[in-house]
Image: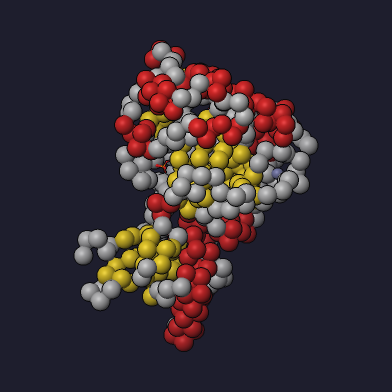
Amino acid sequence: MDFYDAAETWSRDRIAATQLTRLRSLVEHSRKCAFYRERLDAAGVTPESIRTLDDVRRIPFTTKDDLRSQYPDGLLCVPRRDIVRMHCSSGTTGTPVAICHTQNDVNTWADLMARCLYMVGVRPDDVFQNMSGYGLFTGGLGIHFGAERLGCMTIPAGPGNSRRQIKLVKDFRTTVAHILPSYALILAEHMREMGENPADLPLRIAVVGAEPYTEAFRRRIEDLFAMKAYNSYGLSEMNGPGVAFECPEQHGLHIWEDAFLAEIIDPATGEPVPDGEVGELVMTNLCREGMPILRYRTRDLTRFLPGECACGRRHRRMDRILGRADDMFIIKGVNVYPMQIEKVIMGFPEVGQNYLILLENDGLGDVMRVQVEVRDEYFVEDMRILHNLQNTIARRLRDEILVTPRVELVQSSSLPCNEGGKAVRVQDLRATK
Ligand code: ADP
Ligand code: ZN
């Protein structure tokens, strides 16, 4: 195995032993803030009482509301002067939370990120273009310092502005891009409208994450640009990107277990789910000095993949994120995740690069409308062909989610897109009626 740092080659035993030592130190260290000291005391948790990794379950969970209640610096465990950087979450589901890092924290983070990039074949000769928002969002500086650490020429392009994005790729012969999945398809569409083929760009690898997307969506990105796309998972509370990443096998994301302790729980009971079953990911940051976070409930849904990865790394893998617990909506009594819909529609070659789910109430009951862009070459005048497509999509959706939506076919580039950030896939207009 060609690796960036030795921890990638550790055996399960070595990983587990390191996790236990680090968990004990973390319990000790996190007592430096009143919030965790009180919580841990109330639960009777001391470093000595952590005897096995299962003892992590005696530590109370930390929720996003806890982090909000401690904003801005209630969770600091080092003197303020030791902090060198702060970031915030994007605020996708409400008030953002702030995380503060020491110099060691940002160094560890950059190394974890460099490890991810190296794993999928990024090398110092590569030119790395970061098409993510900079500023408080961790996908900017977090990825940037990882690519620099690896020795890549790193272009802080920022999000959107497709024309300039493409010019930079061409002028500097960019070989690796960090890009949001939704934006990748919009960029491809933009090029097509300019009469250009995205596959002609020098890009060979894309790092794609920060929002949920399906396997069908990934294949599309890979096909359009003729490059490999690797799934990158992270969250601000656990630094940001560099928490879990796909290896060249593209079968699950390795969680860097030397730095993070991952659990998957039943969100209703808080108990671990049987291996291989879907539940809520809970994460503990084992190495952070500035603001340790214990057993953070991510609200992201995934499962551990059983078995060992063919790449040789023994860090456990998780499946791609199914969605956030908060993304689920209920229509006619049925629970639906946007990714179930994406999985179906992105399987149709006629379907273009964007879609939108609208939930409404027409006075008689809830209605779900799925607006789907159709590629120009299929947007023909023969209404029968379009009707057929519409009906087939509606039928397949009904098979998947057990509710029949109204499918509306629209022209490419006609749906709203959020070039600067994470895609909004669902508009729930029911509450306003
Ligand atoms: P926010 O939760 O406000 O969006 P962050 O910017 O910290 O704040 O984003 C972290 C969240 O983004 C994760 O909890 C997860 O829901 C989502 N996310 C990040 N990477 C991925 C990925 N590869 N696949 C699916 N969702 C992801
Ligand atoms: Zn692997």
Which colour assignment does the render follow? Answer: secondary structure
Tell me residue 80's x, y (percent): 39, 15
Decide if residue 255 is in sight here: yes
Above or below for 237 versus 49: below
Decide if residue 187 is in sight here: no
Above or below for 432 versus 259: below
Quarter of the image for residue 355 reads: bottom left
Work out which quarter of the rendered image holds the C terminus and state it: bottom left
Tell me residue 272's x, y (percent): 55, 45
The number of numbered discs placed on residues in the rendered structure image is: 0
Tell me residue 359's x, y (percent): 33, 66
Work out which quarter of the rendered image holds the N terminus and state it: top right
Tell me residue 56's x, y (percent): 54, 32
Q: Is residue 323 left or right of residue 124?
A: left
x 65%, y 33%: residue? 115
Q: Is residue 357 left or right of residue 277?
A: left
x 76%, y 41%: residue? 312
Instruction: Pick the residue in front: 202 or 270.
Output: 270
x 41%, y 57%: residue? 328
x 49%, y 24%: residue? 45
Q: Residue furthest right?
A: 1
Above or below for 184 versus 232: below
Instruction: Pick the residue in front: 223 or 250.
Output: 250
Q: Residue furthest left?
A: 433
